[in-house]
């Protein structure tokens, strides 16, 4: 259940960007999670709710963008979506491959609501 | 609405501490391994066999990670090596800052080889760099030959694979070459050892490899 510490790391990053007095205006936080990142989106969402409870970020939405595992073969030059983690090209069976995507675990953006100006 | 674009790795704080650990270890000429596996694969038994074997030839220190108890540090201390126990109290993996604190309790000047035994877990520890030179994943035959396919990230991030409990092969439905092939499908560059801590088979080859690598001082 390392999603709890992942959620805390996400909150730590958000806090570096948004000062305390503006945190209640955070509408959503976009994160990117690859197939091979070893993070379960549902567990992360649950953990995020748990670590933000009672804080100004509590109502913020955690938007999780799922990134598929894509393998590039340096022999037949194909890109394929295969079983996450497999290092063998499904087209030519070569082991000379590179992972193009699927290991991402990133905070991408924070969306803030405009603060309503106080009426005079 | 306004958007702040960030594009940062979630675990960058851990990675930064891991870099500091790596520099510290390299500065002291310590070859550090992060040993990972599911619980019960035999990490501590391999460690005990290794300590027995390397006694008098390499100066070894151990960091033990467990969810609870200092049982492993006590097992290891019998071999008269410096051992620091990290108790995560529920945490399913070690993080770089825990290892940094543990390193503070070791006299790194008198260490050639540091073995960090991670919490038994085939999922979470793969995400956390501790500052090690490489990860060693232990897979035991009793877990079945399909584990590398089910837990690919761990096998992909490791440099060494130890196939343990090979003495039990006659009694269980696990085919060693299938287990090895499955691991190599995930990571073709794995260095593979086959061991039994009961018979001692394969421990020699593993210790020869360890000694060669520990004597080749890592660059910072």
Image: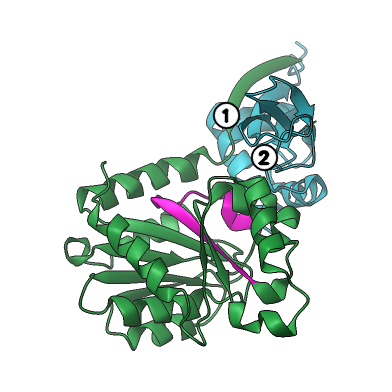
Chain colours: A cyan, B green
Q: Is residue A79 magenta?
A: no
Viewer can see residue A1: yes
Q: Where in the figure is residue A88, as x and y percent of width and height?
A: 70, 38
Q: Which residue corresponds to the image point at 23% horizontal and 50% vertical from the top-left?
A: B217
Q: Which residue corresponds to the image point at 68% horizontal and 50% vertical from the top-left?
A: B152
Residue picked out by circle 1: B8
Residue placed farthest to the right in the image? A42
Q: How many marks?
A: 2
Q: Where in the figure is residue B201, as x and y percent of width and height?
A: 48, 79
Secondary element at image label 1: strand
Which numbered marker is on residue A87? 2
> Relative to B52, does residue B10 appear above or below in the rendering?
above
Question: Label 1: how many residues lie within 10 Å, few (<14), some (14-19) or many (20+)?
Answer: some
Secondary element at image label 2: loop
Viewer can see residue A5: no
Q: Where in the figure is residue A76, as x and y percent of width and height?
A: 70, 22
Give, as a single range, the part of the protein colored magenta: B123-140
The answer to whether marks 1 and 2 mark residues whose Cβ atoms lie closer than 8 Å is no
Q: Which residue corresponds to the image point at 73% horizontal and 85% vertical from the top-left?
A: B171
């Amino acid at each position: 259940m390392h999603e709890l510490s992942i959620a805390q790391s996400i909150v730590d990053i958000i806090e570096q960007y948004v000062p305390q007095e503006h945190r209640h205006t955070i509408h959503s936080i976009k994160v990117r999670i690859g197939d091979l990142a070893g993070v379960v989106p549902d567990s992360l969402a649950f953990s995020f709710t748990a670590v933000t409870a009672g804080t100004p970020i509590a109502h913020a939405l955690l938007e999780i963008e799922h990134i598929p595992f894509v393998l590039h073969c340096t022999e037949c030059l194909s890109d394929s979506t295969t079983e996450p983690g497999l290092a063998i090209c499904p087209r030519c069976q070569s082991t000379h491959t590179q992972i193009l995507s699927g290991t991402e675990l990133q905070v991408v953006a924070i969306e803030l609501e405009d603060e309503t100006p106080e009426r005079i | 609405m306004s958007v702040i674009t960030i594009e940062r790795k979630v675990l960058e704080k851990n990675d930064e501490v891991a870099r500091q650990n790596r520099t510290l270890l390299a500065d002291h000429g310590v070859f550090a391994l992060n040993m990972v596996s599911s619980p019960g694969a035999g990490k501590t038994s391999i460690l005990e066999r290794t300590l027995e074997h390397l006694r008098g030839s390499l100066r070894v220190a151990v960091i033990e990670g467990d969810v609870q108890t200092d049982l492993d540090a006590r097992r290891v201390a019998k071999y008269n090596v410096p051992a620091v126990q990290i108790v995560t109290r529920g945490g399913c993996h070690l993080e770089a800052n825990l290892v940094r604190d543990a390193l503070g309790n070791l006299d790194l000047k008198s260490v050639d080889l540091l073995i960090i035994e991670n919490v038994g877990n085939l999922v979470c520890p793969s995400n956390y760099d501790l500052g090690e030179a490489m990860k060693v994943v232990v897979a035991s035959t009793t877990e079945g030959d399909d584990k590398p396919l089910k837990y690919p990230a761990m096998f992909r991030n490791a440099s060494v694979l130890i196939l343990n409990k090979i003495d039990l092969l006659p009694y269980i439905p696990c085919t060693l070459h299938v287990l090895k092939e499955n691991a190599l499908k995930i990571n073709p560059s794995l260095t593979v050892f086959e061991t039994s801590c009961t018979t001692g088979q394969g421990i020699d080859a593993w210790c020869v490899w360890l000694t060669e690598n520990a004597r080749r001082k890592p660059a910072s």
